[in-house]
Image: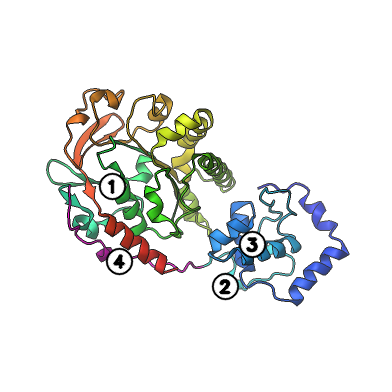
Amino acid sequence: MVYNDFEMSRNIVDEQKSASIKAIFDSDLDDLINEAVKVVIQYDRASASLIQRRMGIGYARAARIIDQLEALGVIASSVGSEPREVLIKSPDEVTGIKPKKEDEYIEPELKYKAPKLSIISKPKQNPWKHSLSDVANKLGENEVLSFPLGFDEHNKLIVGNLKELGSLIISGNIWSNKEVFLDTLLTSLVLKNSPKSLRFILVDQSRYLNFYDSLQHELTPVINELEKSISAIRWVQSEQYRRIKIFAEAKVRNIEDYNAISRDKLPDILFVVSQVENLFNAYPDESVIGIKQLTLKGQMVGIHLVFTSNRLTVKEIPAEIQSDIPCKIMFHMTSNNDAGQLKGSNAEKLEAGEIIFINEGKSEKLEAIYISEENVKNVVKEIISEK
């Protein structure tokens, strides 16, 4: 965190500021002020939109809390439209705020209840051989970031785990329904993870992923404009650097070790970009540099990238990005040439729902898991209703 001149600023608090603090305490200090302090310390920045999103409150109330945090010396005064600087390291430093012992350092409880797996029903029509309803009862048996990849030639369910895979590219032509695989992945993860353990950022020009809007798992509403996705990449980069720093201070190397010793657990972050080739074409320099940096340390700090693309040629996805993400899912391609460096994969001969799973140079043909649009909507609806 940045604490320049913090001690000096604490020592020169004048009577006017003291009076403003007293006025706040004499009136009605917001009931959520202690939780807001923890939020801005965790993110090392402060803004009304951050408080609104993280605490699930209205913008007017969030803005009022920001004013109170400034008066209490928790955050600096505003400088243009930039997020406020956080001036303290722990809730103990807040003038006049004395949280109850039993509440100290405890993450505020989210009004969240995981939907029952029984909500996944058998689809009325299934263009593939297998559906998520066939394996729903097995979703809880594996790691929290695991998801069904598909069935192999021996009819054995193969499971992927983002903790091990790190990041993933899903490719296939526009008729391959690769987006259904993405739905299966996202829904499987949401069914097993609360917002405390998993957050995500979705970038999708086509608005296909807008079904997931308003989920508590989201760090921001679904991003539909490419220019905003660059800001999202920068934020994820800053979060990666922040986590690397706190891991170093805690003398641990990864998110699993940190969460094992910390009271304030860090959630994994899933950064999804649909049709990522549009992003690389529109912003080749910033997007490639930013994403390459995320692939280097992302897995260690709990940041995972999932991209979809119509093709796997270097024209769509630069070779340096493809080499940094060895895990790929290939649906039906127009020709083998579309698979770029993966010559001989026969991806153009795949039937509906069939995929080639490639990881670290090894490939395997699988039958993917289908989920209906109705099931996606039902899961999202039930989670949102628990807010």
Q: Nearer the viewer, mark 3 or mark 1?
A: 1
Give the number of marks.
Answer: 4
- Mark 1 crowdedness (10 Å alpha carbons): few <14, some 14-19, many ≥20: some
In the rendered image, which residue does mark 4 sit on? Answer: 116
Placement of 242 over or under 332, stated as above or below: below
Point out the tag, 1 or 2, that comes first from the N-terminus.
2
For this view, does 115 lie left or right of residue 257? left
In the rendered image, which residue does mark 2 sit on? Answer: 102
Disc 2 is placed on an element classified as: helix
Q: Nearer the viewer, mark 1 or mark 4?
A: 1
Disc 1 is placed on an element classified as: helix
In the rendered image, which residue does mark 1 sit on? Answer: 180
For this view, does 333 lie left or right of residue 25? left
Q: Is residue 368 magenta?
A: no
Query: Observer-nearest residue: 155 or 262?
Result: 155
The magenta stretch spans which residues?
109-127
